[in-house]
Amino acid sequence: MNDILSPPVSRAGLHEEPTANTVLQEIKATVGTATVENPKMQARNVDVHYGEKQAIFDVSLDIGNNEVVAMIGPSGCGKSTFLRCLNRMNDSIPSCRVSGEMSLDGEDLYGPDLDPVLLRARVGMVFQKPNPFAKSIYDNVAYGPRIHGLAGNRGELDEIVTESLKRAGLFDEVKDRLDAPGTGLSGGQQQRLCIARTIAVSPEVILMDEPCSALDPIATARIEELIDELRQNYAIAIVTHSMQQAARVSQRTAYFHLGKLVEVNDTNSVFTNPQHELTENYITGRFG
Amino acid sequence: MTTTHLLIVATVLAAVSYFAGRARAWSVARENGGIRQLHSLPTHHGALVAIWCFVPALLLVVVWKLAEPVYIGNIVNANVPAELSAGDERQIALYRNDVENLISDGDASQITDDGKRALGERLLAQRSSSSLALTLLALAAALGGAAFAYKRIAAPTRARHSVERVVKFLLVSSASLAILTTLGIVLSVLFESLRFFQQVSFTEFVFGTSWSPQTAIRADQIGSSGSFGAIPLFTGTLLISAIALLVAVPFGLMSAIYLAEYASPRMRNITKPLLEILAGIPTVVYGFFAALTVAPAIREFGSVIGLSVSSESALAAGAVMGIMIIPFVSSLSDDVITAVPQAMRDGSYALGSTKSETVRKVVIPAALPGIVGGVLLAASRAIGETMIVVMAAGLAANITANPLEAVTTVTVQIVTLLTGDQEFDSAKTLAAFALGLMLFVVTLVLNVIALLVVRRYREQYE
């Protein structure tokens, strides 16, 4: 199935054109290795437009099984937009147009046969701000399994809820008050509740859009531990503004700049030996 | 000067004092080395001087106008002919009215009756002197107050605190106005109702099942003592309101969901105002729409399928009323649905739910308190609605749950009771106040329940 996608290098070459006299001129093609041997999701030559304005320029990136890919870059660089394309959350924005190829297990995400509702059950998402539903803790986690009919009876549903809460590291804190409203939890607990809600539908990929930006350091540390554990079973892409976080949780790091993917490599080499000048400037704090 | 002129002059004086006070505060500031040395801003000082100018004059006018009639009443009592002053008050009032009419042109000299002429002259003289005294005193109060406050302007004077206390007092009295008006209405209805309950027992009124308010117009009429059991009216109101809500809640809620979740912005901009026009149609128009169009249509339809429908059916009135209150439900629900954060919808979509699942299971539950509030508001409106039921529901006080029969409502009966040519203290007329009181209690209870429901959900979800 993977052969519907052409190798990134040849395609990237076609788009190489002389640009205006800006910093963009330096970004000719992505530096580093955008592909992995065992890809779960693949993006090739993706362009995204909001109306007339182009937000993503020719991005190609793989997300492998059992790995965490961190996406870093200054605000407005398109990393969140790219993430939201991976489970078609941008569909709700009428002016948004996506071109290029994106696939999950070789299946075209923007193909005519793909149902975005089913896609999102396989590619879950955790948002920047915790967004629990106005329901009890139990019902928040049970929401996904219920709409997808994953549990045959109440006992099975109880088990899914308990298991998801345990894996999100929240169960011990809330086991006595599963009927309490999810919105009454603290910020960090709410975010773990949202993660529990996401893993309750057993997705294959989890996308995280700055999941810790609203949390304190202790809650952040718990979520980072959790991400590391979840890696055993899922492919994870995380957008973050914290370079320390990217260094701690990810195996590969992608640096975005003004809608272009500047550099992608092993996290270690990106942070110790950046290949591109823009990446180096960003991680050493010279701008961004 | 008349009172109106006096108040206009006082206002002008207050404006002048404002500017004078402000100018003086500026000069005080300059003497002390800059505006920073003043405790309060010059505008506060100006406002304080204006308040000291206007308020004492206003208070004086109010007190004067309250005291004047008492004083004049004493003059009249002292000047009526001896044979009247021993008699009852009504005759004195009549005599006084007569004199007042005669001197309304400001001239008492043409009155032929000596006694009346003397009183008329006395009254005219008293009035002109009173008016002159009031003018002088009020102007003195205004100028004196302004001068007092003007002299007090100094760097440490805390004018801001005083002005803000006055502003706060104004705000409190505005808020009290609505409350006091409500209280006044309730009390006046309550006292009339108490008079009614002296004639008809409370239990008969609340639990009686027969409504026939025909009382004797003259004492020599036989029979008709009337029966005042309000149950048929309240069941009628309940039936029609229930039908109205059965129409309004599903249609209103579904149009709100369409407008908030599915309609394109263009569609929404056109449809929402159109829907809200429904609330702007005069209820009397709905009334004849119900009586002339809907009721006959329902009767025709009933006869086609073999049901006997009375020409003034509860169904016709209720259905039209339901259409009238659709905007109450839809507009309020639309607002609360739109207010549900997009993040919550995104969370649901990200779990792989469809749009309708998201609306049904996430958006509506989150918006429920507001929706319940809108529905209860619509219910209060339906219970109090008068014109449609007057025209379309009829006067027959039946106890029935059959929407095809004619029923009557509390509001219809209030209208019919008060549009007769009855004495105003007969049981028939007073019954209208008792009905009004009951209706008020019912809507009050409904509003309290609405508040409790909304608060319960708030505590749970915010």
Image (cartoon, rainbow, N blue to C red):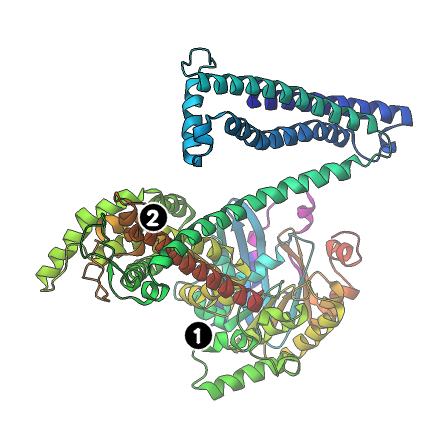
Chain of the residue where label 2 is placed in the rendered structure: B
**Label 1 Cα neighbours within 10 Å, binned few <14 / some 14-19 / many ≥20:** some
Label 1 sits on a secondary structure element that is: helix
Residue B161 position within the rendered picture, expressed as x and y whole percent measured from the top left? 77, 40
Does residue B129 appear to the left or right of B189 in the view shown? right
Query: In the rendered structure, which segment of residues is drawn in magenta?
Result: A12-33
Q: Quick one: SS at disc 2?
A: loop
Give how far across and how far down residue B105 sits, in percent: 44, 15
Indicate the position of residue B328 as horizontal and vertical percent values: 39, 52
Which residue is at a point 52% across and 30% down the rendered structure image? B73
The correct choice, above or below, for B102 with respect to A255 in the image is: above
Using a 10 Å C-alpha cutoff, classify the residue at mark 2 as few (fewer than 14 neighbours), some (14 to 19) or many (20 or more).
Answer: few
Q: Residue at x 54, y 70 (%)?
A: A124
Asked whether A14 or B434 is in front, the reply is B434
Q: Check residue B425 in the rendering and tell me which mark sits there, or answer none.
A: 2
The chain carrying label 1 is A
Front residue of B207 and A63? B207
Residue B312 placement, left or right of B380: left
The image quadrant where one finds the C terminus of chain B is bottom right
Is any part of residue B258 visible from this angle? no
Q: Could you tell me which residue is drawn at 86 percent across and 25 percent down?
A: B28
The picture places residue B56, in percent across and down from the top left corner, at: 69, 30
Q: What label does residue A147 carry, if any?
A: 1
Q: Residue at x 49, y 49 (%)?
A: B182
Q: Nearer the viewer, residue A272 or A240?
A: A240
* Residue A23, magenta (yes or no): yes
- As measured in the structure, the alpha-carbon distance from the residue carrying label 2 to the one carrying label 1 is 66 Å
Type of amino acid at the residue the image marks with label 1: Ile
